[in-house]
Amino acid sequence: MATRSLYHNIMLTGPRFDLYSVYMSKPRTNAQKAAAVERVKKWAIKNPERVKTNKQRWATRNAAEIREYTHTYYIDHKQSLIENKRRWRAENKAIFMAQCARYRKAHPEKSRERCSRRRARIHNATIEPVNYIDVLARDGRWCYLCEKDITLTDEMHFDHVIPLSKGGAHTMENIRPTHGTCNVRKHSKILEVKHA
Ligand SMILES: [Zn+2]
């Protein structure tokens, strides 16, 4: 139980995938069942497209049930699921790091938001969901630190105007676009003051 993935468990114990349920619903001897499963497996290898559309149809038809099952399964097994994930990450560090890097590259805004929220939590700051596209729509590509445009080739950062470390909030209001270089300069100044 512990080593199976959530998806695997749903396939085994949740609402069944059409094809298998048809085969398994007829009364059969164990040998007949095994042979039927083998036939299905062979068929599936030869017809990957059909398998794909069948699975999609199954998922659409049972969407509500799957969602509910997934949710209750998660609640019932939360601790072991978290434990499994942690163990897998520890045992597959290189793969995990590569996955993270790929994810960050594909979703820069999500990982940025996650970092910000984490820092905000550490500083006990007020946290609101921040939509960076809305921030850009409000302020444009304009750096409030040096008061110049941020060109498309410039690196752009989103800065907490009042730093989280100084009681600033992680909210749309407190976040503005800056040049990457200006943002870094501002933060090194804050650190200089801190250590002076
Ligand atoms: Zn600037």
Image (cartoon, rainbow, N blue to C red):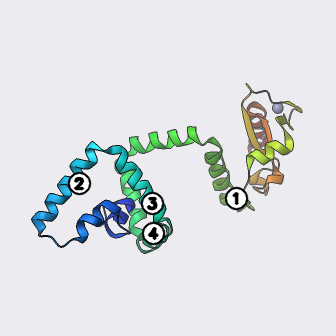
Q: Give the amino acid at mark 3.
A: Ala
Q: Which label number is shown at residue 40?
A: 2
In the image, residue 96 lies at what x, y percent? 43, 45
Label 4: how many residues lie within 10 Å, few (<14), some (14-19) or many (20+)? some
Counting residues from the start of the chain, the first of labels 4 and 2 encountered is 2
Viewer-nearest of discs 1 and 4: 4
Gap in angstroms between the C-alphas marked 2 and 1: 56 Å
Counting residues from the start of the chain, the first of labels 3 and 4 encountered is 3
Label 1: how many residues lie within 10 Å, few (<14), some (14-19) or many (20+)? some
Q: Which label number is shown at residue 59?
A: 3
Q: Which label number is shown at residue 123?
A: 1
Q: Give the amino acid at mark 4.
A: Tyr
Viewer-nearest of discs 2 and 1: 2
Gap in angstroms between the C-alphas marked 3 and 2: 19 Å
Placement of the N terminus among the 4 image quadrants: bottom left
Residue name at image x 46 percent, y 73 percent: 72
Residue 150 horizontal side relative to residue 28, left or right: right
Gap in angstroms between the C-alphas marked 3 and 1: 42 Å
Q: Give the amino acid at mark 2.
A: Val
Counting residues from the start of the chain, the first of labels 1 and 4 encountered is 4
Residue name at image x 80 percent, y 42 percent: 136
State the SS at label 3.
Answer: helix
Residue at image mark 4: 74
Counting residues from the start of the chain, the first of labels 2 and 1 encountered is 2
Residue name at image x 84 percent, y 35 percent: 143
Label 3: how many residues lie within 10 Å, few (<14), some (14-19) or many (20+)? some
Residue 10 vs residue 50, the one in the foreground: 50
- Of the four image quadrants, the one with ligand 1 is top right
Counting residues from the start of the chain, the first of labels 3 and 1 encountered is 3
Residue 176 visible, this orientation: no
